[in-house]
Structure formats: C-alpha cells, structure tokens
Amino acid sequence: MKTQVQKAEAFEALHKAPGCFVIPNPWDAGSARILAGLGFKALTTTSAGYARSIGFPDYNAGRENVMAHIRAIAPMVDVPLAADLEDGFGPKPEDCAETIRQGAEAGLVGGSIEDFTGDRSDPIHDIAAAAERVRAASEAARKLPFKFMLCARAENYLNGRADLADTIRRLQAYQEAGADVLFAPGLNTADEVREVCRSIDRPFNIMRGPRKEMLTVGQVGALGVKRISTGGMMHAVAMSAMIGAAKEMADAGAFEFTKTMPFASEIDALLAKGAG
C-alpha cells in the first residue's frame, strides 16, 4: 500500500499531466475499493452520498462523522483520496484551517472548501470573507509534510445565483488566496465552462459537465477542464437500483432485478483489485 506522501505525489502528478481525468465519489470503503478496482486513479468523497448513507440529508453529518468516514476509506485504497469538506465545518477561517489539518491526519491528500454559508436565506459568503477562509485553509495545507491539493468552490449556481461574472471573480480571488484547484458546480453550458477555464490559471473541476448539456469526458476536457467529479451521483445510482428492486418486490412480488445485477464473484474481484 502506498504511503500518504506517495499518494500525494501521485495526486499532484495527475493534475500536472496532460488531459482531463475523472475522479468519482465513493460513499463508503466498499464503493471506494470497487471504483479503484475499476481503474480510477484518484477518488474524492461525497458529502451528500455519505450523509444519506448514514440516514441524514446533505450537510448534516458533521465534522466528527466525516473525519471517521475518511479514516475508514483512506487506508482501504491504494489511490489518492480527496474529500468534500463542505463549508469547512464552520464560518471562520480557523474552522477551515482546522478541517484541513484534521482531514490530512485522517488520510486525505486533497479536499475542498466552499463559500456556502449553510443559510439558504443568505447562502454565499461575502467574497472577501470567503477568500480569507480559503487563505487560512491554504496556509494549513502548506504546513503539511506533503502536497495537499486544496480545492476552492464557488457555490453561486447551486444556490440560485447564475452570475457568471461574480463566479469568475470569486474563483480568481480564491486562486490568489492559495487554492490549487477551483470548482464551480452547476454551470449550465459549455460556453460558461469554457469562459471560466479561460479566466483562471488553476486546474478546474466540474461535476459531470455543464448541467444543460450531456458531454463526454473528452468533450468536457476540450473545454479546458482538468478533472470531473460526480458528487452524490454514484450513491444516487446505487440507491436508484435498490429502490427499483425494492418496489418490484413490494408492488409486484417479483425478482426480475436479479437478472441484471452483478455476480457476487464480480463484486468480490473488484474489491480485491481495488485494495491494491
């Protein structure tokens, strides 16, 4: 199994290599090993998928549970693990710094801090305050004995603020504050994604691709995107299959779903392969 330093080196190298890479989001150790077994070179946790897997809505798991979650996944895979660290689990810059320190201790080599306030009536931090939060997280990351890839997220589009100019200003402020990767989830079109990528000089992360267009990995990469994450989508896909099977049993008393499910041996083989 690779050391945390080796994983950090591999993760940084992925961001420097040519092209775009997919970094899917497992919600537990088993899904992490399966994704690693399928050949993905890095993984990042999902706040929504994990929270729902323990019975809570997104943003309700809490830092203590999230850190335990990271400690459960990180040593189980031989690939770099980053994490959705939500809003840093607190409004102050020192909250974000402490979250980075705890995340690194738990086994992360990367993680994201977003500018969402947690208050849907006033959802986005003032840009200056948001940049200070990123700066504190960056300073904490720089003190670590390995390269920690800090991702800063601009959450405008997920909160009813489809303001491209403000989103770009925020991303530029966050890169100046020390972010290594930038992320603006919810961008609607390829043109918006392309404009963002032209306006920053850090690797850009997107979730699947522009919301209103269904593009391939190659097409998304051609826009200037460096990495593609999936958020809670992998968990949602798994839950979709489970809910469909449960409804079939409950409503029709049938088991047709068993015709298309993977064999146990296939799952076990991927778990073994994902362990490295």
Image (cartoon, rainbow, N blue to C red):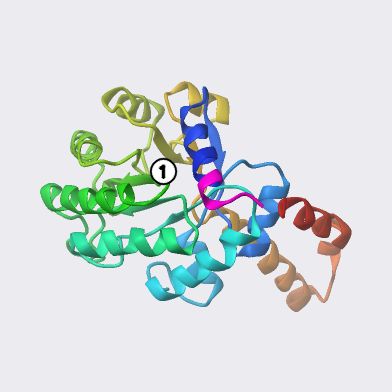
| Mark 1, residue position | 147
Task: Give residue 137's position: percent from left, percent from top.
Answer: 27, 53
Give the amino acid type for the residue marked by disc 1 in the picture: Lys
What residue is at 34 percent from the left and 38 percent from the top? 180
What residue is at 56 percent from the left and 71 percent from the top? 53
Task: Give residue 208's position: percent from left, percent from top.
Answer: 50, 41
> Does residue 255 appear left or right of residue 159 in this picture?
right
> Does residue 205 appear left or right of residue 262 in this picture?
left
Task: Give residue 104's position: percent from left, percent from top.
Answer: 42, 58
Quick check: is 2 in the magenta stretch? yes
Secondary structure beneath disc 1?
loop
> Does residue 248 appear left or right of residue 214 in this picture?
right
Residue 208 appears in the figure: no
Which segment did they paint magenta? 1-6
What residue is at 27 percent from the left and 60 percent from the top? 96
45 in relation to 95, above or below: above
What residue is at 54 percent from the left and 38 percent from the top? 10
> Does residue 226 appear left or right of residue 120 in this picture?
right
